[in-house]
Amino acid sequence: MTAFDPFNRRRFLALSGILAGGLGLSAVTPAWARSGTPGTAGFGTLSGDSIALQIGESHFATGGRSAHAITVNGTLPAPLLRLREGQNVRLAVTNTLREQSSIHWHGLLLPFQMDGVPGVSFPGIDPGETFVYEFPIVHSGTFWYHSHSGMQEAVGLYGPIVIDPAGPDPVACDREHVIVLSDWSPIHPHEQLRRLKMMGGYFNRQKQTLAGLLAGKDQSLSERLEWAQMRMDATDISDVTGSTYSFLINGHGTLENWTGLFRPGEKVRLRVINASAMTNFNFRLPGLALKVVAADGNHVQPVETDEVQIAIAETYDFIVEPGEADSYAIVAEAIDRSGLVRGSLAQRPGLVAPVPALRERPLLTMRDMGMDMSGMDMGEDGVIDLSKPANDSMSGHSMSMRDPTVAPGVKMGPGVATLSPMPVDRLADRPTGLENADHRVLTYADLRALDPNPDPRTPSREIDVHLTANMERYMWSIDGEALSEGPDPIPFRLNERVRVNLINDTMMPHPIHLHGHFFELVSGEPGHRVRKHTVNVLPGGKASFDLTADGEGDWAFHCHMLLHMHSGMMRIVTVRDEGGAA
């Protein structure tokens, strides 16, 4: 009788888990997203003037984890829609769930009634009903779609959209791959929210420790005491982390190794979409430069870099030129370094690129509190006493973390724990955690639009919008009010030009998305400022954009971290004709 080998048993169980995950995966993976595909141009996509989509329930498994999922046409991610600029499209969406659902066409310019936000632009799609979205396609680029109902987006209801230009594409390539990044957890997002309400750092397994202090790591004792006094945690980077999330590329975890094919010397276009519910990703292909050619669907003047932090809801198009190596790793690392997902760009199926080690997790700084101390007298021994008035060099700046005079438009209450005393423009800053990377990192200031900005007018007025929170109690809001409190909409007159200053009074980055419009980030000389639909506002800082309010109607304006939006960090924007309410 052969002795039982525990190692082989463990290996068998592990392989069984992977196989089960793989079988579950293949059952719900659309053709365009399967591993080893030659590319997505003309392959496995839905296109044409009339498209039928069905929202339903499925089961999803990855890396040994499995749970209930909400899918479109039975797949996760949802089908890839391939459309063409200038066409009209008719999308009949049938809801087979037992709850209301919806689809929002993220980044597309369309009539507001077709935008797909229940309670804002349409009533939603009730169980058993079909809603027909019909609108013209007026621009090209890389976009995506997702549910705007409850937490459905977090459990699978998202998919990519590629719109080909009506004329020649200024981006030349030999093949392209669509890469959808996402996060997946068997813990339902409502349960995640409940746990975060109980304890703000519930999923953070990377806090500073006494052992770390004794080993000389992280903050010094005095810094830790100061931060503790302010009830701040320098490791509070992400709310939901790799402790519960599996990170995915096209629905594949690292073990399932999604692979896109290439031949040496080709120019490969990667259309990368961050469809995560709560995860900002650091994206890179070690050994390959990333040439950025589009951001949020809009072409940019090509700029080369090595790593890009892709915020939730953003899309970037890159050109890479792989050499003779058999395979290159496609790496999406969570912003807090609690996990990553690795795929491969390979010459043939079956090749596995190495999995890079997770880098050291970042720590927040005083700059992330909205206190830029550079060039200032810090007081005795370089220590700031937040209970005392500012000294001479800080004249005109409040040092209080909750001074209402720095934000007169904010409704103060228990939902506002901090206000940034000295927020600075951070569009040229490297994003959180990549400040000290020893290679090139993209900043917003590196981006310039390929085409001239369509509206050269100087804004006629300026508004401040504060992103506010009580992070310890997991309360999120805009200008101190959650959407559930019924704040007044933010009004714009049709076609007026407005500068919007987003001020982040929290210690987390917030990817802020405006529906139905592109806006120009105020960075660099006017004329070719990058046009986007989402901007990631770094902690304690601010980001300004100029908006031409040319989309008449009611639009959602919100943080795209799903739990933040669900908790209240959302407003309605109204755009009215001169004779209207605006």
Image (cartoon, rainbow, N blue to C red):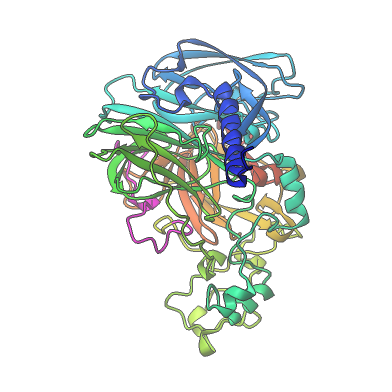
Q: Left of 436 or right of it: where is 417?
A: right
Q: Residue at x 62, y 24 (%)?
A: 71
Image quadrant where residue 554 sits: top right
Q: Is residue 62 visible?
A: no
Image quadrant where residue 16 sits: top right
Q: Residue at x 37, y 25 (%)?
A: 39
The verdict on residue 315 being magenta is no
The verdict on residue 442 being magenta is yes
75 lies above or below 9:
above
Front position in the image: 334 or 65: 65
Q: Position of residue 192 (x, y in %)?
A: 72, 46
For the stretch drawn in magenta, the main secondary structure is: loop
302 lies above or below 578:
below
Q: Residues in magenta?
A: 431-457
Image quadrant where residue 262 sits: top left
Total count of labels? 0
The residue positioned farthest toward the bottom in the image shown: 380
Quadrant of the frame with the N terminus: top right
Q: Left of 69 or right of it: where is 502?
A: left
193 lies above or below 440:
above
Q: Position of residue 89 (x, y in %)?
A: 49, 14
Front position in the image: 331 or 158: 331
Q: Position of residue 291 (x, y in %)?
A: 29, 42
